Amino acid sequence: MTADTAASEGIHVVREPGPNEMRDPLMRAELKRASVWFGLAIGVALIVLLIQPLLIIFAGLVFAAMLDGGARLLGRVLPIPRGLRILIVVLLAISFIGGVFYLTGVEIAAQAEQLRATLEVQGNRVAGWISSMGLMPGRADLTGMAQQALGSVGRLTSAVGTVLGAGASLLMIVSIGLFVALDPRIYERGLQWMVPVAARDDFSVTIARMARMLRVLLAGRLLGMVFEGVLTWLLLWAVGVPMALLLGIITGMLAFIPNIGAFISGVLMVSVGFSAGTDQGFAAIIIYFAVQTFDGYVLIPIVAKRTVDLPPALTLSAQILASTLFGVMGLALADPMVAMIKVALESEAERAAKAVDGNNHGHRRFGWRMGHSHAVDPAAIAVEPPAAS
């Protein structure tokens, strides 16, 4: 009995290579392309799932940049080992914060409770006045709207919403920052090992520029925080606005978040001012605009000459997106994120321009893969012979 064949049975058999035929060059090329897209999708999914620890790590790097900047400034006057300089910076920061709360702790606690009660009274007055004009829903509807707004801040808020979660996150941020600031060269070498050898020079330059811009940006932020906090406290105290010390501290802390922080501190300042009287309320408005005008037109331009120049609309848009996606921590870290991305894009554009203008025998496409060039083989260029005369 002879075996039946596919042809004898009238069955059509596909002869082209299938997905499991990896010897075919076309299938191997398609598999590589599919792997890139699958890897990109997996990477995006991992970022979404691990956004909380990633933000904590980035906050630790921001804290390390602060410590590194302080150690570099201290190194100009004290030629001592880096570890001792980091220790001195940490001790000075702890001493300053501890001294402020030790000298004014009771006053700050009393003013905090008074501020809560004042804001509640002022909020009820404003809500009642607007509701009486028919421009706002009832109180029950307002409560539901407020809960929905707070619930849409971001998934990170639920993770660090408790005191325990916030304390644990702060401890991890400080630990990461200290480890990186004590010996940044170890982590720099590790990042360099993760890129090809041909791209390490460009990669190292980009990382160094990012670190420098981050240090200068944070130095400017800290300078603005101290200036706004102290000046606001003194001016409010001079015109008789209640809780001047607490409002100064809140204004200084919120100055780390440009645009949105200034708006929140202004609302608090004006609300407390009008709770004490009409004169104090208008004085608070004048003080707010005077401080913000001086900070925006004098202090920030001076700092901007030495740091990365971020357009206000770009910064505000990044803050809105980061706060919606990542919560309060994303709002605080939006400015450093945008600054580092901007430096990376500028460095990549600079390398692309140099590759195009300085290399007559090659062409380099713009992309994130630094140092990757597409050289043109001169032998592959067909040269037409001159025409016979």
Image (spheres, rainbow, N blue to C red):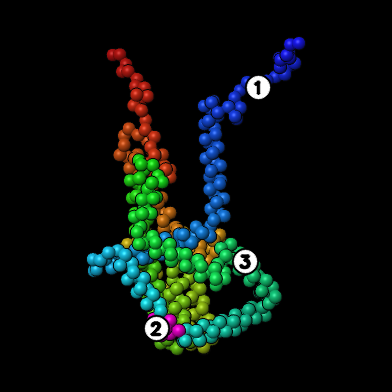
Q: Nearer the viewer, mark 2 or mark 1?
A: 1
Q: Is residue 175 magenta?
A: no
Residue 278 visible, this orientation: no
Residue drawn 38% across the image and 46% down it? 193
Marks 3,2: beta carbons within 8 A: no
Residue matched to label 3: 151
Question: What is the residue that sits farthest to the front in this orientation?
Answer: 1
Disc 1: which residue: 14
User: What numbered label is drawn on residue 234?
Assistant: 2
Q: Which residues are magenta?
A: 99-105
Which marked residue is nearer to the observer: mark 3 or mark 2? 3
Q: Is residue 236 left or right of residue 70?
A: right
Residue 309 x/y as whole percent: 38, 59
SS at mark 3 in the image: helix
Above or below residue 288? Residue 378 is above
Report crowding for label 2: few under 14, some 14 to 19, many 20 or more residues within 10 A (C-alpha).
few
Work out how far the residue at label 2 is from the one at label 1, CA to CA, in angstroms: 85 Å
Mark earlier in primary sequence (3, 2): 3
The quarter of the picture where residue 251 lies is: bottom left
Q: Quadrant of the C terminus?
A: top left
